[in-house]
Image: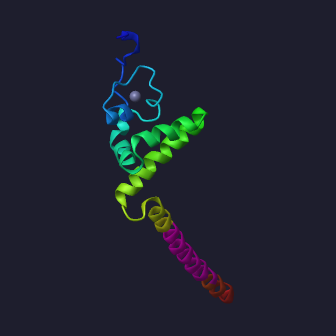
Amino acid sequence: MDASRVNVNRAPCALCTTKNKRCPKNCEFAPYFPAEKLGEFESAHKLFGTPNIMKMMRLVSEDENKGMLASSILMEGDAWKKDPVRGGFGIIQKLKWQIELRKLYLNELKEKIKVEKEKTELRL
Ligand SMILES: [Zn+2]
């Protein structure tokens, strides 16, 4: 085996660990799925399957887009782990609901300010 191709400076990436294979020094997935992301990657692996994640990553050409795709894959995996029924859609629904509640609260505050301003103007 060529020793220069074996990774000696860092832990094997999450993808190679999941596939139970050696992580080469120049592993194409290591920058996007470092060892620290193993837990998140395992969730994504359960959702998409590692071969599909590899296919998706290889379809994207630019590094910047690969980074965004890797983040999306990890976030989706995490979302489905937390909410096995609604996944990412559940998170969006929850955030929309929180926005609506805050809009209602903001309108309530605006109305109180308006009433107080009117009271102040009447006293002047
Ligand atoms: Zn690797």
Rendered-image quarter of ligand 1: top left
User: Is residue 54 rendered magenta in the image?
Assistant: no
Q: Residue at x 38, y 35 (%)?
A: 15
| Residue 116 in picture, x, y percent from top left | 60, 83
Q: Residue 6 is drawn in which quadrant?
A: top left
The image quarter containing residue 5 is top left
Q: Residue furthest bottom?
A: 122
Way the structure is coloured: rainbow
Q: Is residue 35 above or below residue 83?
A: above
Q: Indicate the position of residue 32 as horizontal and vertical percent values.
A: 47, 35
Q: Position of residue 61 (x, y in %)?
A: 60, 34
Please state if 42 lies on the left or on the right of 113 as rendered.
Answer: left
| Picture residue at 41% right of the left edge, 19% below the top | 25
At x 48%, y 63%, the residue is: 89
Q: How many marks?
A: 0
Q: Is residue 83 above or below residue 15?
A: below
What residue do we see at 52% from left, 41% from top? Answer: 56
**Quadrant assignment, res 39:** top left
Name the magenta segment's main secondary structure. helix
Relative to the observer, which residue lies in front, 55 or 40? 55
Is 95 situated above or below 34? below
Q: Residue 91 vs residue 65: left or right?
A: left
Q: Quadrant of the C terminus?
A: bottom right
Q: Viewer-proximal residue, 71 or 5?
A: 5
- Which quarter of the rendered picture does the N terminus lie within? top left
Residue 63 in the image: above or below residue 103: above
Front-most of 38 and 58? 58
Tell me which segment is drawn in magenta.
96-114
99 in the magenta segment: yes
